[in-house]
Amino acid sequence: MQDKSNILLIGCGGIGTITALNLETGGKAAVTAVLRSNYEHVKAHGFSIKSVDHGEVQEFRPSTLRKTIPDVKEESLPPYRYIIVTTKNYPDVPPTAAEIIKPAVTPGYTRIVLIQNGLNIEKPLIAAYPDNIVLSGVSFCGSHEVATGKIVHEDDDELYVGAFRNPHLSADEEDGAAQEFCQIYGAGGKCKPEFNPNVGFSRWRKLLYNACLNSICAITDLDTGRIQLADGALDLLVRPAMEEIRAAAKACGHDLPAELVDFMITMDPITMYNPPSMQVDVRKGRFTEYENIVGEALNEGKARDVPMPTLTVLYGILKAMQWRTKERKGLVEIPAPVDHTVKN
Amino acid sequence: MQDKSNILLIGCGGIGTITALNLETGGKAAVTAVLRSNYEHVKAHGFSIKSVDHGEVQEFRPSTLRKTIPDVKEESLPPYRYIIVTTKNYPDVPPTAAEIIKPAVTPGYTRIVLIQNGLNIEKPLIAAYPDNIVLSGVSFCGSHEVATGKIVHEDDDELYVGAFRNPHLSADEEDGAAQEFCQIYGAGGKCKPEFNPNVGFSRWRKLLYNACLNSICAITDLDTGRIQLADGALDLLVRPAMEEIRAAAKACGHDLPAELVDFMITMDPITMYNPPSMQVDVRKGRFTEYENIVGEALNEGKARDVPMPTLTVLYGILKAMQWRTKERKGLVEIPAPVDHTVKN
């Protein structure tokens, strides 16, 4: 049996913590997790997890906890075989993932695993690390950090892993890395990731959920249960948006079966009243991943002359909401208000 | 000089209070105002008004204050010549304006003045009161009740009055009533309402603002200043929606000049940071007037085969948000939540 894989995990919220738990449970990985706001709490108390797959887990700690990104050279650390990024992706708000992981990447050795949503997320990483394999993780996993260090995982962990194609690297080696990662992740037996040679298909498939349900829930502040109940929301918004994604995916060579529309709509049971990730982000005043989730889908579809009127409007709204968040966080300046009750 | 007109005013918030102030100032009207949540406060202290037209006005009280709709017969009251309705219009949430004003209407005598937004608002009133003239008031007036009984009026009062056509009544009499109302309203000199024989044009013209800016501000929670500043909001949302309204208006026989688009966008100066009515409603957890403002415009346009993709999406979002408000107010029931962290 081989030594444990040395794995760095960036982003230890709802999805990241379940990722760490699966990896550590399998015994084939030693996980270094980089925590931010929850570092002190988790160092003292560990994560407290209530999981549909793992049951109740108290005081869970990845092998190593860190507050900062490791600098492999400066700190003379052993190289990381995998860096898993589960953070949100905001290309319009620096720093990007490619910038963040820089000191932890060993060129030609480290595999970068993006368990993140949307399209074209690999492009800046392949550009920055042309000699490193970049893997795609598409996760369907309802898991939220409901309080600091407290994780509620109520929707089965389903993970599809494949390789983003880098023309400079061997496709066989890329696929081999994806398969090895599946073995390490699945060793604990609670979640068996599926090796997925057609990354594009999986990513477009998940966009049915993300570009449509996720974004519409974020805009309307209705969770995935309520969106199924609300007057006209499915017929006026969700289904038209999903059909646009199907048409754009088809134009890109990915045939998403019509049945997937209802499958995605009912994936979260009504009575779970699950707020999807973008809705949580909006509620918490955070940025949303609208550029990769909606914007890139639009770009790909429009480049192929696919009409996408619904997603165009959703994109415009999400972009306006992102500006609002930037303004609230002090990242844009606006002219001072003037008292208009007095005539000049 | 004639006696004062006996006028009933329903809805004494931002717009209604300025309406009462104009009418009382002119000396040609005695206004009975029906107040709800602010009745006790206004009875004790009057309205405190800071107005771009009227300056600072303290302790303003309409001639008569009431908590309930007068029952003219039961209470043996003199009949009302005008009933002005400035309340919001929610055809999807009863009771409707036609139901509310019933005990105050004297058939064949009372003129009903709807200073309300949107299209087809007169239909239920003409159906309920076929012998009464129904007038249209289209108001551009930035005025808000910022605290109980405290009105800030920061945008010039601009009012267009005309008659909704009732085929059973004389058009001359209808127009005469509209002109008389303009005289009564304008007698104070602070606001000169414009007699407006083409009600359809004025209402579609105002929809440029309401169906587009107002609804988009409500959805994005950006006021009319910020919507001019936010990335892409005008080009991706506001302008396309306005062009759809122009196309629908044209199909209905109303030619809204192209320059009106920019006129409406810049009508509220950026530095006013004015939250339009629907945005205020959403912020306060109230219902919005989306059915008359967006839904009826869509109905009219679609009936004439005008493509309105942007407004279709905005309508779907506003309808979903209305459902959310209904649910929060306990007007719809949803299935109880189930704990999905435990597998069956």
Image (cartoon, coloured by chain):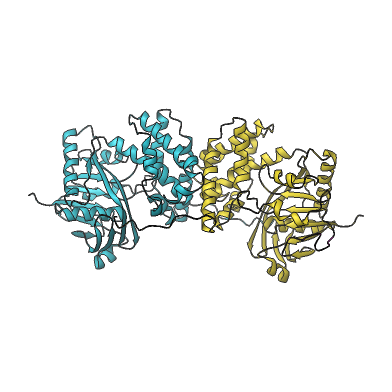
Chain colours: A yellow, B cyan
* Residue B21 x, y percent position in the rendering: 22, 56
* Residue A143 x, y percent position in the rendering: 67, 55
Report the number of numbered marks: 0
| Residue drawn at point x = 62 percent, y = 30 percent | A304
Check residue B139 for magenta coloring: no
* Residue A160 x, y percent position in the rendering: 74, 45
Which quadrant is the C terminus of chain B positioned in? Answer: bottom right
Residue A317 shown left or right of residue B33 in the figure: right
* Residue A306 x, y percent position in the rendering: 59, 31
Q: Please name whichever residue, B213 or B98, is drawn nearer the observer in this view of the structure.
A: B213
Q: Where on the picture, by quarter, is residue A168?
A: top right
Check residue A69 for magenta coloring: yes
Q: Residue furthest left?
A: B1
Q: Residue furthest bottom?
A: A44
Q: Where on the picture, by quarter, is residue A254?
A: top right
Q: Please name whichever residue, B44 or B255, is drawn nearer the observer in this view of the structure.
A: B255
Q: Residue furthest front?
A: A344
Question: Residue A189, can we see it?
Answer: no
Which contiguous range is marked in magenta? A67-77
Residue A104 shown left or right of residue B49 in the figure: right
Q: Please name whichever residue, B338 or A59, is drawn nearer the observer in this view of the structure.
A: A59
Question: Residue B4, can we see it?
Answer: yes
In the depicted structure, whether residue A259 falls above or below residue A293:
above
What's the magenta bit mostly, secondary-structure-wise? loop
Residue B90 shown left or right of residue A105 in the figure: left
| Residue drawn at point x = 50 percent, y = 40 percent | B236
